[in-house]
Image (tube, helix red, strand yellow):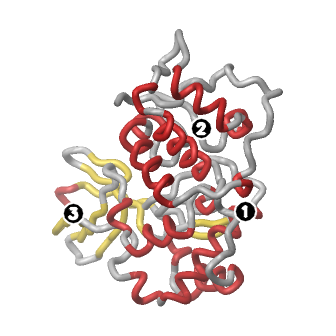
Amino acid sequence: MGAVLFLFLWGMVPQSQPQAQSPGARRVSSATLLEGKQIFASSCAACHGLDGRGGERAPDIATRRGTQRLSDLKLARIVDAGVPGTGMPSFHSLGASAIKSVVSYLRTLQGGGKSASLPGSPQKGESIFFAKTGCSDCHMVGGKGGFLAADLSSYGHTHSVEEIREVITNPDSMRKAGDKIVLAVTRDGTKYAGLVRNEDNFSLQVQTVDGNFHFFMKSDLQTLERQAQSVLPAGYHSALGSRDLDDVISFLIHSARTSKTAPASGEADQ
């Protein structure tokens, strides 16, 4: 299966289209969502991203209002027949059942299926996020927090409780291929750990947890170690505890639901 599964948005979605089916209006089985997620990952993510928010080759199909207003039937028809004259081919070979699964999974990326009760307390989760655990040393929510890792302000809008739990408990599984985490030690023994923002054969720019940028000539470094793990420390969820973890997850989802900028784009998987 090829790359583009929903390349039909630019100028093709009339604003008069009926509102999409309410996410809470029907229940979708976990098996259906899993099938849809697998197909989306293999057939759509190369162009639209794993979160459906677009890229260089295809548009945002998760937060774009025009797409959200399309009915499930309309989306299924487009996937099935394609759009002549565009990069959107027919995926009739998937079959009606698989196409329905993809559409159902797309709804979760659009924020559907997130109306279930929260597993913990958003208020306690906020305190944990900004004080107890140091999440905000790297991540930002609602304009507050660090700059090293992703802004999580809208993350809970397009990710379920279990998806967020998986990222926290197994952060390396979601680490982006382009991320380079290093520990640079200068000749006087000073250590700088963070993300590589720029690098060539002779120099290196690292952004540390406090958000500051540091420029080094490689010849001036005592050692430069490449780290294999995510920015999120290994075993972080164990130190957090299951109850605190539920509270943090609830805070992220609640923040996304109540934020005026929740539908806006913004990645978070770091």
* Residue at (33% x, 65% y) in the render: 172
Using the image, determine if residue 198 lies above or below residue 245.
above
Considering depth in this image, is 190 or 109 the residue closer to the camera?
109
Q: Is residue 209 left or right of residue 115?
A: left
State the CA–CA distance, disc 3 to disc 1.
37 Å
Using the image, determine if residue 208 lies above or below residue 239.
above
The numbered mark at residue 257 is 1
Q: Position of residue 227 (x, y in %)?
A: 24, 66
The numbered mark at residue 61 is 2
The numbered mark at residue 139 is none
Q: Amino acid under label 1?
A: Arg
Q: Amino acid under label 2?
A: Ile
Q: Position of residue 254 (x, y in %)?
A: 70, 70
* Residue at (63% x, 75% y) in the render: 250
Q: Mark 3 — residue?
A: 226
Considering depth in this image, is 136 or 120 the residue closer to the camera?
120
Q: Position of residue 49 (x, y in %)?
A: 46, 42
Task: Categorize mark 2 by other alpha carbons within 10 Å: few (<14), some (14-19), many (20+).
Answer: many
Considering depth in this image, is 146 or 37 the residue closer to the camera?
37
Which residue is at the far right?
16
Q: Position of residue 252 (x, y in %)?
A: 62, 70
* Residue at (59% x, 56% y) in the render: 28
Secondary structure of the residue carrying numbered label 1: helix
Answer with mark 3 or mark 2, whichever residue precedes in sequence.
2
Q: Are marks 2 and 1 in contact (CB under 8 Å)?
A: no
- Which image quadrant: the N terminus? top left
